[in-house]
Image: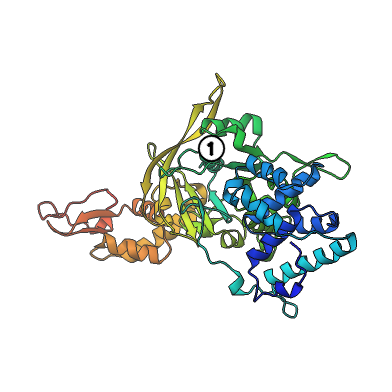
Amino acid sequence: MILNDMAALQPQKLALTELEERIAGWLLRDCPGVPEAVAAELRGEVFSLPYSRILRAIFNARAEGRAVTVRAVAAELQQCEALQALGGLDYLQAIAFAAPTLISEDDGRKQATETLRAWKRMKSPRGPGVELLRADLINPGQVEWVWKEWLAKGKFHLISGAPGTGKTTLALSFAAAITSGGRFPDGALAERGSTLMWSGEDGVEDSLLPRFLACGGDRTGMHFVHATRGPDGAVLPFDLACDMEALATAASRIDDVRLLILDPVVSAVQGDGNKNSEVRRALQPLVDFAGTSGAAVLGVTHFTKGTAGRDPLERVNGSIAFGALARMVLATARPEHEGERRRLVRAKSNIGPSGGGFAYDLEQARVPGHPGLFGQSVVWGEALEGSARELIGEVETPTAEDGSATDRATEWLASFLGNGEGAAASAIKEAASAMGHSVASLRRAKAALRVESYKQGLYGGWAWRMPKMLSPNAEGTGQKAVGAFE
């Protein structure tokens, strides 16, 4: 909308959303004096909902050579089920009716440019060299969720873990729930929508798509990032480090994108993945995509080798900036013993509760509609309570790289117990945690030293002591040596 009196655009007199409404109404009239250059500039701006949807419908009509009319835009919005959310056809007509007609190309260019500048001033009032956003122009709100307290709309997430824990399959199971309107592990019903996925490691036809379908996904809502096209029309491989802007443009043509999966997310970093500054710069386009699209962005990555027993957030591969920039970090663990289940836990959350998780198994399931074809799927188990470190430490598979953690725990436990009369198991575990030793490392250290557990009297708690301290006449005194991790 172009206002004849530009003084009315002063921030103290006009709310940001009202000015967005006037701009959208002006474009709905498709005034003959609106220059394409200004329309292109507006296309690059970030408007709040619902006005961004109106603008998108207008620009789609322009791109396809169709007339921009209220009914044409309404038809476009009706296809993406957005018209009702905007207030219906009457609302669009009211906006268009309030917009004046531009008289000439020159007047249109001048007024359009002034209006765009006014909108930018209100969006970010300028100081000397610094852009500021005044608080009274911001509408306070709360976090919106794709999956409550696990996947947030408009936020960047990570899922990290050791190889073989099924991180990609877990991500595909989330996509399956979203595209089919199915259920998440806690039983919550997913809001149906679309998902995008890029993978630099797995094939779509023989790996990703079978897994997605085996998890119950609806293929009409799944979009795999395939390639890009150069200026000459040549097909080029998609480069996560360079092509996020092009991906954002492609995604803007889909109105209901709920989730973007990037596997592996480290491919976004062209430079040194261990340098905070380089990682932050490289990941910023992912954060921006989440913010502008309203989708949850989920990056898949690995744990650093030899870090078993440490806090899961510290184990994320590469710079600490990966975990710092993500608002939510999920972690996976593989069980040590046969019959135990893998675990998905919340290692970090800046926007909700942390800790807790779910047990799960991976199995080969039949792909619906494709006899003889199988894909890996997720079978969810019970909900888990506890910190991420505890939940992972209880089941994590020891590897050759874990030796140093076990060695440190063994040395510490031997020193702690010394040659004394033993100590309460609860006190030992608390002291070990304070020193940075995981439950799994402590358990292996106990086995390596052949530390014995025994009851302190008939009604006492469990205690530990070095084996040589077990009294030869302990039998019959209420002290019973056992091998359990009590």
Quick check: 292 left or right of 429? right
Q: Residue at x 44, y 58 (%)?
A: 354
Residue 133 locus on image (x, y percent): 65, 72
For the point 28% across and 61% down, which residue is it?
426
Mark 1, residue position: 176
Examine the image and state in which quarter residue 412 appears: bottom left
Q: Residue at x 79, y 42 (%)?
A: 66
| Viewer-closest of 193 and 160 | 193
Amino acid under disc 1? Ala
Give the left or right position of residue 148, taking residue 90 as reference: left
Frontmost residue, 437 versus 279: 279
Q: Percent position (x, y) of residue 51?
A: 66, 56
Quick check: 26 left or right of 167?
Answer: right
**Is residue 273 visible from the viewing direction of this image?**
no
Q: Is residue 13 above or below residue 363?
A: below
User: Disc 1 on helix, strand or loop?
Assistant: helix
Q: Residue furthest bottom?
A: 128
Residue at the top extreme of this rendering: 371
What quarter of the picture does the N terminus occupy? bottom right
| Among the 4 quarters of the image, the one containing residue 325 | bottom right
Q: Position of residue 402 (x, y in %)?
A: 49, 52
Above-or-below relation of 413 to 169: below
> In the rendered image, is residue 348 in sight?
yes
